[in-house]
Structure formats: structure tokens, C-alpha cells
Image (cartoon, rainbow, N blue to C red):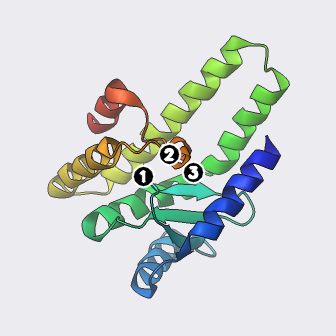
């Protein structure tokens, strides 16, 4: 499992490029405003359907190449919420439990529900800091990203493949 993850992140690194300076500056300011010592590396990856945050020690945020403007800022806020909550570590812990108890369907259910709960918690943390107009834009961004149906392996790397009911739950916040 670790080998596949390592190969996946190396592949993302190969097909991505550093984000533009203006986006890097915005990201650094956002992270500094939340007390993060150093902003994770920010890269643009063409064909990526949604943002992907990887790495426990050397964190990298991969952004879709087409994400711009207000949608970009909202996505950065959401990913910053993942960083503030240490979600990468929590998800690694849950995946480790799945490796130990691969035979237990309840552990796999926990994995699915934990992933959903982490996303909902970050959505809530993000919209708590937004005004009414920005909340509507956040919902539209979630819908737009999830509607971009690309049959690629990169689609499975994001949590935007949660289906209609999962998307409805995320927007209802």
C-alpha cells in the first residue's frame, strides 16, 4: 500500500508544476494567518478533478490546473482546514487500522465514514468563516468540481466522488 501511495505521489509530482507566484503568496498568507509554521508546497496538476493534499512530513497540495478565482480561494480555505485539523494524520491512522483488520467489515465501514466526516468537518470549518454570498459560491464550487466526470485514476484521489447524497449532505451545511 505504501509503495502504491509513493508511486502515486511521484507521478503527481512528475506531471505537475509549481503554482503561480500570486497563488503561492495567497496560500502562504492563508497558512501564516492560521499559525502554520510553513505553508505546504503548492503545485498545479492538469487533469486533476479536485485538490489533493498529500504527505505527512513533506506536505504538498496539488491543485487542478483549471481552478481559478474565487473557486481557487475557497478550495485553498478548505484544504487549510484539513491542515489545521491534522486530517492527513487521522486518515493515515484509519488506513493503518484497515491494514491490521483487513478482514473486519466494520473497520472498512469506519474508513468510509471517517473520510466522509473529515470532509464534512472541513466544509463546516470553511463555511463558518464565510459570508452568505461566499457560502453560495462554495456550494456552487462543490457542485462544479463534482460534475466534472473524468474517467481517470486521478478522480479517485479526491473526495469529490461521494455521489449525489454525499454532495447534497456537503452542500446542506
The C terminus lies in quadrant: top left
How far across and down, in percent of the image, does residue 91 sit?
Answer: 66, 41
Q: Earlier in the sequence, mark 2 or mark 1?
A: 1
Residue annotated with mark 3 = 85
- Outermost residue on the bottom side: it is 21
14 left or right of 117 in image: right
Q: Do the CB atoms of the residues marked 2 and 1 lie less than 8 Å apart?
A: yes
Q: Do the CB atoms of the residues marked 3 and 2 lie less than 8 Å apart?
A: no
Q: Earlier in the sequence, mark 3 or mark 2?
A: 3
Q: Do the CB atoms of the residues marked 3 and 1 lie less than 8 Å apart?
A: no
At 70% across and 33% down in the image, what residue appears?
94
The N terminus lies in quadrant: top right
Q: Which one is in front, 35 or 92?
A: 92
Mark 3 Cα shell of 10 Å, populated few (<14), some (14-19), many (≥20): some
Tell me the element at label 3: loop
Mark 1 Cα shell of 10 Å, populated few (<14), some (14-19), many (≥20): many
Tell me the element at label 2: loop
At 79% across and 20% down in the image, what residue appears?
102
How far across and down, in percent of the image, does residue 62 sit?
Answer: 53, 63
Tell me the element at label 1: loop
Distance, label 3 to label 2, CA atoms, is: 29 Å
17 left or right of 37 in image: left
Residue annotated with mark 1 = 49
Q: Any mark on residue 137, and which? A: none
Distance, label 2 to label 1, CA atoms, is: 9 Å
Q: Nearer the viewer, mark 3 or mark 1?
A: 1
Residue 65 placement: quadrant: bottom left
Residue annotated with mark 2 = 152
Amino acid at each position: 500500500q505504501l509503495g502504491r501511495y509513493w508511486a502515486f505521489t511521484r507521478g503527481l509530482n512528475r506531471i505537475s508544476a509549481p503554482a503561480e507566484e500570486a497563488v503561492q503568496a495567497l496560500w502562504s498568507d492563508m497558512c501564516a494567518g492560521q499559525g502554520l509554521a510553513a505553508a505546504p508546497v503548492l503545485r498545479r496538476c492538469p487533469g486533476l478533478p479536485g485538490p489533493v493534499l498529500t504527505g505527512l512530513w513533506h506536505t504538498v497540495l496539488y491543485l487542478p490546473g483549471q481552478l481559478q478565482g474565487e473557486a481557487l480561494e475557497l478550495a485553498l480555505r478548505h484544504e487549510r482546514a484539513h491542515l489545521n485539523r491534522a486530517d492527513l494524520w487521522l486518515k493515515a491512522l484509519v488506513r493503518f487500522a484497515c491494514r491490521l483488520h483487513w478482514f473486519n467489515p466494520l473497520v472498512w465501514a469506519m474508513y468510509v465514514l471517517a473520510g466522509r466526516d473529515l470532509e464534512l468537518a472541513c466544509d463546516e470549518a470553511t463555511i463558518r468563516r464565510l459570508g452568505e454570498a461566499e457560502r453560495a459560491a462554495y456550494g456552487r464550487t462543490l457542485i462544479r468540481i463534482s460534475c466534472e466526470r473524468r474517467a481517470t485514476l486521478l478522480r479517485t484521489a479526491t473526495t469529490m466522488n461521494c455521489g449525489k447524497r454525499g454532495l447534497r449532505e456537503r452542500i446542506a451545511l
